Every structure is written in C-alpha cells, then in structure tokens.
Image (spheres, grey):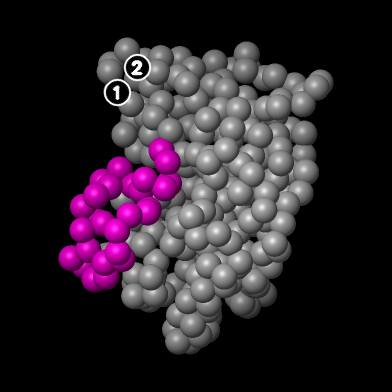
Amino acid sequence: MSRSAGETDNRDSPGFTTLRKTLDEVAARGQRVPFWWRDDDAVAASPALDRLIDLAEAHAIPLLLAAIPDRIEPSLGQRLAAAKNTVSVAVHGLAHHNHAPPCEKPAEFGAHRPLDTLVAEAAAGLRIARERLPEAMLLPVFVPPWNRLAPDLAAALPGLGYRGLSAVPGPAIPGLDRLDATLDPIDWRGTRSLRDPDALLQNLAAGITRDPARPNGLLTHHLTHDAALWAFVADLLETCCGHPAVTCLDPRSLFSGAAVETGAAGSTLQRSVAARKG
Ligand SMILES: [Zn+2]
C-alpha cells in the first residue's frame, strides 16, 4: 500500500500544481529531470520501514537506505532481503554520535576530533555494515550523520574502500562519486513535522526550471514521519515517478561496479557527471 486509508491527498494544492506544470514544460522541451531518494537512520525492521519499502515498491523507485552500522540489528537485513530489489544500503557514519561541542551544529565526522580517529571510525562503519548485512545489498557509500564531514576525511574515504558520498551538495571529491540530498521536508528545528509544503514545492520547481539536469534528491527519515510527512512523500512520488520528464536514478548503477579506484585518476569520476553536479 502506498497510501493509508484516510490519508490526505494534496496533489491539487498550489505547490503540486506548480511542480506538475514545471515538469510538463520540461517534458515539452524534451529534457529530463533526474530524481532519486535517500532515507536515513535505519537500524531494524519496523512498521515504518515496511511503509517506506511499500512506497518505494509501489512507485518502482530505487531507495538508498542509510543504516547506522553500530546499531544494525539482524531484522534489518532480513526485511531488506524480502524487498523486491528496490532497496540498497549505504553506511550512515558509525554510531550516529554527536562529537561537536554544544555551541556547534551536530556532527559525528566533523573536524572536532583527530583525522586518524575519523578515518578509523569511517573504516569501522564500512567493516561492520559488511558484517551485518548481505553483501549484495550494501553499497560502499558514506552518508555522514547530519550531512557533515571534515574535508580531510572526505579525501581519505576512497582509500578506505568507499566509492561514493552522499550528504548535502558540496565539492567534488577525487575518487568518489557523490549524489546528494536536496529536498528535506522535515522542519527539524521547529515542529519536526512537514515544512510548508507549498514553499518546498515552489522551491523544487524553481530549481528544476533553473537547471533541469541537476539531480533532485529527496531525503526522508522513516522513523520520524507523522501522517503529514507520509502523505507529502506519497504525493511527491505519485507526481514525479512515472512523469515523462522524470528519470529515477538508481544508486546501485551509480555506486556499484568494478574494483575501487583510488586517487584523482579514478575513472569513477568520469562516469557520472550528473552525480557530481549534485
Ligand atoms: Zn542520521
């Protein structure tokens, strides 16, 4: 089920109307809009995870699930193994601990600790995720908690076996493909529910008009969603997936592949211009 009984459908709202009109215009020009989806903080099977996977399957959109290695329970791999090949997993830090001082924005992998420590923990994240999840579903993609990481650590990730980075848009990193989140519908500092949906959608539409080729990355947090957030995500997927202007990107085709190449000459850099632009 992609929509619960009684769940509101707001696709006639001004925001969704604007988005649809923008996508129609892009399609009329023969252009395509890349769209992809990441969900963070997975640790175990749950009704919320079921609902998330149901949505991805109903809309046939690949989902990159960022799991917290230190907290992954066996039920997570079991649930994902039963999914219809729509979900892949990325490494969401190590334990999702905040190491920033109280006066700063939270970060697990910010420049608040020695680089050696950050490197060791990022390596441990990948190692533990590999131990706890079936190999076929795990992508060597680092998703720093709170989307923050020290530039020195980013540069070191290819040497640890990572081939991808997903955060919020930032600079290209030699040896890594990056595909970033651009649309977070949660009002984290206020209600922790849905931000003003019309403002979100007008902003999304304006970004598409400015640069249709730039990937749009939806970022969700299934364990946090209330009814308004679930309804918004369902409406957004309903509007975008299947629209002739939209190409749903599969993180697996961007991030998986042959042996990891390290250093600035890594050919993975050449592979995905669209991903790097995110
Ligand atoms: Zn997180």
In the rendered view, would you say 207 is above or below 94? Answer: above
Q: Residues within 10 Å of mark 2 (few under 14, many from 20)?
A: some
User: Splitting the image into 4 quarters, where does residue 66 fall?
Assistant: bottom right
The residue lying toward the viewer, choosing from 102 and 112, is 112
Residue at disc 2, secondary structure: helix
**Residue at the location (45% across, 57% down)?**
139
Q: Residues within 10 Å of mark 1 (few under 14, many from 20)?
A: some
**Does residue 23 appear to the left or right of 12 in the view shown?**
left
The magenta segment is 249-275
Residue 257 position, x and y percent, is: 33, 54
Is disc 2 in contact with disc 1, using a CB cutoff of under 8 Å?
yes
User: Splitting the image into 4 quarters, where does residue 50 fall?
Assistant: top right
In the rendered view, would you say 24 is above or below 170? Answer: above
Q: Amino acid at mark 1?
A: Gln
Indicate if the residue with disc 2 has its beta carbon within 8 Å of ligand 1: no
Residue 86 position, x and y percent, is: 53, 40
Residue 145 position, x and y percent, is: 57, 63
Q: Amino acid at mark 2?
A: Ala
Q: Can residue 268 be seen by looking at this rendering?
A: yes
**Residue at the location (64% across, 71% down)?**
70
| Quadrant in the picture for the N terminus | top right
In the rendered view, would you say 249 is above or below 115? Answer: above
**Does residue 163 appear to the left or right of 266 in the view shown?**
right
The residue lying toward the viewer, choosing from 161 and 92, is 161
Q: CA distance from mark 2 to mark 1?
A: 6 Å
**Does residue 154 appear to the left or right of 221 in the view shown?**
left
Query: Which residue in the structure is indicated by mark 1?
Result: 31
Assess whether residue 263 is covered by the magenta stretch.
yes
Residue 260 position, x and y percent, is: 31, 66
Assess whether residue 247 is covered by the magenta stretch.
no
**Residue at the location (43% across, 33% down)?**
248
Q: Which mark is residue 27?
A: 2
